[in-house]
Amino acid sequence: MPPPKITHKTWTAVDEYFASLVAPSDSLLDAAVEANRAAKLPAIDVSRMQGKFLHVLVRMLQPRQVLEIGLLGGYSTIWMARALPEGGRIVSLEYEPRHAEVARKNLERAGFLDRVEIRVGAALDTLPALAASAPFDLIFIDADKPNNPNYLQWALRLSRPGTVIVVDNVVRDGRIIDAKSSDADVQGTRRMFELMAAEPRLCATAMQNVGAKGYDGFAMAVVLP
């Protein structure tokens, strides 16, 4: 039998197949998604499989402190909070007060508000105050893409040797390869990659992925001794 034609429908079906086995539907996570939609938040949450990736990563690293730049409605935060070790905490930054309020209710409903500190405001304004809390063991960057270079630089300042940095949405439907793109998201992500590649303190990689969220990917780096 010839292989099926690869389409977005195929990617989504494969994602659903995997998710049905290793990331099955969950009432608390589903409630967070429904609350985000009801509040008309942008539909840019990570997918279930991406959420499970973050969950597995937290279980592997057993971080005491996680920094999340870009909270939105707290869906990815719940995935990570569920995997935290005893005493672990997440500091999550969110620009929009309304988004932060929806996330706060989602986290409270899920029973994780005591493990998550939400800081509202432009991340470049709130990040300097985190120096006293550093270092963070895992840093997840999923906010406004033009500022990705700035977020990476702050991640380095707030890290230690062994800290893992993950940056979401780096493929941009393949537009990342267009050096002349007028898209600020593309240009910000390209500058971030250039900084990451040139930084001797980082060992980095990037992975393309397809699925329910379309064609995108993430970058991952570890801070070297």
Image (cartoon, rainbow, N blue to C red):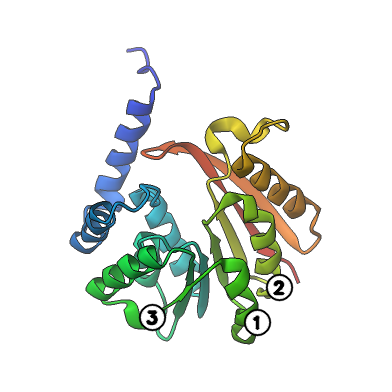
Labels 1 and 2: the sequence-earlier one: 1
Amino acid at pointer 2:
Arg
Circle 2 packing at 10 Å, graded few (<14), some (14-19), many (20+), is some
- Measure how far apart labels 3 and 1 are at the Cα level: 19 Å
Which quarter of the rendering shows the C terminus?
bottom right
- Locate residue 43, reporting x and y percent: 35, 47
Amino acid at pointer 1:
Ala
Determine the secondary structure under disc 3.
helix
Determine the secondary structure under disc 2.
helix
88 above or below 162?
below
Q: Are marks 1 and 2 in contact (CB under 8 Å)?
A: yes
**Image-quadrant location for residue 33:** bottom left
- Locate residue 166, reporting x and y percent: 57, 58
- Left or right of residue 49: residue 64: right
Question: Residue sitting at 38 percent across and 80 percent down?
Answer: 115
Residue at which label 1 appears: 131
Residue at which label 3 appears: 115
Amino acid at pointer 3:
Arg
**Image-quadrant location for residue 135:** bottom right
